[in-house]
Image: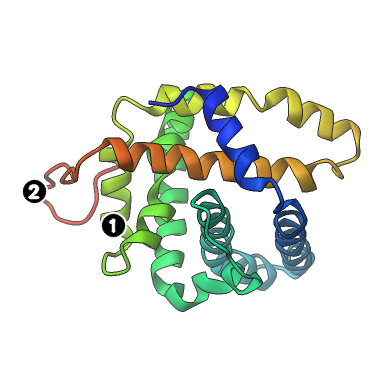
């Protein structure tokens, strides 16, 4: 498996010559989420509207940088590709939120581990159009067995950059976010290139296990 340094190097190589569209894509995502956030001032309705589209937007954001990491040429429309799978992406975001919160209620660390466990679900849903949210979560859990620590280390290597961007009043995140998400795309491809198809853990009750 690639080290964190090698993954970051591959991310920089993918972004070479693509920084402008990559930054503009994240800026568009940021503006949309900021606009949606303003609706949260409306009691209940505003919060509900933001939550309903969060899954679709996350799917589109991750899809863009995954395509970039694969040397493809994503377009602006990629950000909105999640709306074509609105039901699946909404259910996926809802399940991830519920399961992560449940684990966090135990302790913070189990909640973090849970977030890493489900981290590949959006990528899996994108690459496997025929599956649903439950299957995507199960496959993500199987794929991340033995690799949650590696993802944790990769995220830690960006902490210094996050702190520096905070000093710039957030402006630096326009460049850091594409770098970070492209690195995550390379991390995912490293997992699927190494792993064979792993069936989800059996669940006698059907659905998904947390």
Q: Report which quarter residue 25 is drawn in.
A: bottom right
Reading the chain from its start, which is encountered first: label 2 or label 1?
1
Q: Is residue 104 above or below residue 54?
A: above
Position of residue 34 measured from the top left corner of the image (x, y, whole percent): 78, 61
Position of residue 195 measured from the top left corner of the image (x, y, whole percent): 25, 37
Query: In this orientation, does residue 108 appear?
Result: no
Position of residue 142 measured from the top left corner of the image (x, y, whole percent): 25, 39
Labelled pair 2, 1 in contact (Cβ < 8 Å): no
Q: Name the residue at 59% across, 39% down.
A: 11
Which label is found at residue 204? 2
Q: Name the residue at 31% across, 54% down.
A: 136
Horizontally, residue 61 falls left or right of residue 194, namely right
Quick one: 90 or 64, which is closer to the camera? Answer: 64
Tag 2's secondary structure? loop
Which label is found at residue 134? 1
Q: Name the residue at 66% across, 41% down.
A: 179
Which label is found at residue 107? none
As drawn, the residue found furthest toward the right would be 168
Query: In this orientation, does residue 45 appear?
Result: yes
């Amino acid at each position: 498996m690639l080290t964190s340094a090698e993954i970051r190097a591959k991310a920089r190589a993918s972004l070479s010559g693509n920084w402008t569209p990559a930054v503009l894509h994240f800026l568009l995502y940021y503006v949309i989420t900021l606009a949606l956030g303003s609706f949260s001032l409306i009691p209940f309705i505003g919060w509900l509207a933001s939550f309903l589209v969060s899954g679709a937007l996350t799917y589109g954001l991750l899809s863009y940088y995954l395509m970039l990491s694969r040397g493809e040429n994503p377009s602006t429309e990629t950000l909105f590709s999640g709306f074509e799978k609105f039901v699946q992406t909404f259910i996926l975001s809802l399940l991830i939120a519920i399961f992560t919160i449940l684990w966090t209620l135990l302790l913070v660390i189990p909640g973090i581990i849970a977030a890493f466990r489900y981290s590949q679900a959006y990528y899996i849903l994108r690459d496997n159009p025929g599956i649903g949210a439950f299957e995507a979560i199960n496959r993500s859990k199987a794929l991340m067995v033995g690799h949650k620590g590696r993802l944790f280390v990769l995220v830690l290597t960006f902490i210094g950059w996050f702190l520096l961007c905070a000093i710039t009043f957030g402006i630096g995140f326009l460049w850091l976010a594409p770098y970070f998400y492209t690195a995550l795309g390379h991390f995912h491809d490293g997992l699927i290139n190494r792993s064979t198809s792993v069936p989800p853990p059996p669940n006698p009750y059907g659905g998904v296990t947390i």
